[in-house]
Image (cartoon, rainbow, N blue to C red):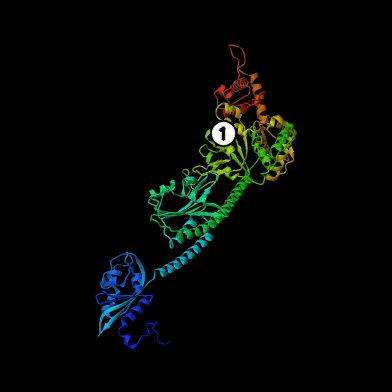
Amino acid sequence: MSPSEDNPFWLQPEDALSNGEQRVRLILDSASEAICGCDSTGACLFANRSATRILGYDDPAELIGKNLHSLQHHTHKDGRPYPIEECPIFLGFQKGESVHRDDEVFWRRDGTSFSVEYSSHPVIREGRTVGAVITFIDTTERRQTEEALRRSDEQNRSLLQINNAIITNLTQETLLRSISEALHRVISFDRCAITLYQPERDTLRFLAVEGALPSDYFQAGMEDHRSQTSAGWVYEHQQARVCGNLQDSPQFANERRLAAEGIQSICVLPMILQGKCIGTLSFVSRERNRYSKQDALFLQEVANQVVLAIQNMQSYDEIASLKARLERENIYLREELRAEHNFEEIVGNSPALLKVLHDIEQVAPTDSTVLIYGETGTGKELLARAIHGRSTRSNRALVNVNCSAISAGLVESELFGHVKGAFTGALDRRSGRFELANGGTIFLDEIGELNLETQVKLLRVLQEREFEPVGSSHTLRVDVRVIAATNRNLRDAVEAGRFRADLFYRLNVFPIEVPPLRERPSDIPKLVAFSLSHLSKRLGKKIEGVSRESMENLLNYPWPGNIRELQNVIERAAIVSAEPIIRLNRDLTPVTGAKSSEDQGANNSQSRDINPESGEALLTLNEVERNHIQAALQAAGGKIEGPNGAAKILGLHPNTLRHRIQKLGIRKTPSRLS
């Protein structure tokens, strides 16, 4: 290249000396790096255009003579004072050494700071440091890029850890704890929470809460109505809500509660599954303006991962619940198989029994509630099994509840279950009989024995198909068919105020009256043969039948204990009999005892003492009591219970009166004893 007037670097020799300073200034101003020169005291001797621009000045002349340390290096990046005697540049002056740093800040004219990388090189003349040349560049963008890359790397590692948590943690407590631990390295928060939408109540329920800031209100299991929470807004709009000045502008009831706890910032993200929001993931902080849009974008990715975890967790819970239910049903069914029932089949073909079987065939395929009436021992449970076995629910459990065998204090827990800690001794959660019978049938035997408080809750189950376990506010829904049974007259119990009328009408949808054994004597030989067949196998004895005389006694006895009493009599006879043909003697059958009692009474009447005043024979105490009870029964129209019943007339408890009727061998009156 030849010299040219257009190129200032190619000058004539005579102009070189006079224009040397201009050439140096032009070279320095062309550099992209900031360049400053200072004397040994730190006073600025020169600065190029880049230094002037980066430091926020208009003209290099504004920097000349000013102390560079005081001007641009007066504090550390955290704001602490930076004495000149600690400055690496001036320490380098003293030692005559170059200095390079990239972890400090310089300050601009307007009071803002920027990350800087600088080098200081001493200027030495005649062996003495007389100043330094300082070069620096603004590294803000580079550091932002590096920080973004580092943050992205940390976030990716956190997402990977969250993915691992999803795979390995399938419970709500461990899941949120693992997510919290993974996120704390990349974003700060005082508490995080997962809420799930409850459509039946239009609420958002806290599934889990995790963090260092405890709360008396925001806890797992707590529910808020959707319209009162920021989570509800996020659920409805399916977009994040970020607020950094909660103390100044809370918009929802839950935000006012958070502000009262000292929370300044919130970030609430929707959890969307297949285009539908199922709940929210939220983070709160006591730091003002803590969450940025970039934070919200990252946390939305976390929320998307949590949705998968929730889906997995719910699937796991469903499988665990199904497994637990099957285990409970298996345990229950094993207990049922171990229990001894009167008969495995309904035996007999008397007209009274055939009518009952016809009723069963009609009602079994439906889901209608059935109320079975009958005296004790007539086989009400056997009929309930027949109804269940012929229903569409036969592949699920038939759960039996003997209401009279459960104490009043435990009947509610037995029926509806309880949560851990609901009462003293409730060491774990227990499923009630209704929950166990979900999808199947529940048989409530002796329903008339339930107390009034439990009757109210039972009525709700029949009407709404829902209940709360003892000690819980969480409602459970069940699909259960109800079969009830009683040996009482429930209408009389309603009149007496011992049984709720509304519950009675709910139960009495399809009543079935089971005939007592004395009204179906033609079935007795079949029942005896059936019972002997099973006893022969169980006892390992050859039993062919009963004697004619014994069968006549069995047919003539009124059987107040019905089939259960007949079975017990036959079993006792089979145990003591040494012959294939069983004979019932006085010690084995109540028939002989009952007849001999009457005969004994007749014999005694022939040798009774005479009343000297009337000249008539005196009655025994049993005869007096029998006559008195018969008179009361006749006056009551055969009723035992109720305000107009015989028990009320005689001043006795109904069960006491029934026992005396059986003991005295009082036969049924024209109206059914109840």
In the rendered image of this protein, does residue 584 appear above or below residue 429?
A: above
Q: Dot 1: within a 10 Å radius of its alpha carbon, few (fewer than 14), some, or many (20 or more) residues?
A: some
Identified by mark 1, the residue type is Glu
- The reply, left or right, for residue 66 in relation to residue 226 is left
Q: Quadrant of residue 355?
A: top right
- The reply, left or right, for residue 243 in relation to residue 450 is left
Question: What is the x, y in percent for residue 670?
Answer: 67, 23
Q: Which residue is mark 1?
A: 449
- The reply, left or right, for residue 667 in relation to residue 230 is right
Question: What is the x, y in percent for residue 72?
Answer: 30, 69
Q: Residue at x 39, y 68 (%)?
A: 140
Q: Quadrant of the C terminus?
A: top right
Q: Quadrant of residue 94?
A: bottom left
- Extreme front residue here? 5
Q: Is residue 149 visible?
A: yes
In the rendered image of this protein, does residue 546 appear above or below residue 396?
A: above
Q: How many marks?
A: 1
Q: Is residue 582 visible?
A: no
Q: Quadrant of the N terminus?
A: bottom left
- The reply, left or right, for residue 62 in relation to residue 656 is left
In the rendered image of this protein, does residue 552 appear above or below residue 123?
A: above
Question: What is the x, y in percent for residue 488?
Answer: 61, 30
Disc 1 element: helix
Q: Residue at x 35, y 78 (%)?
A: 26
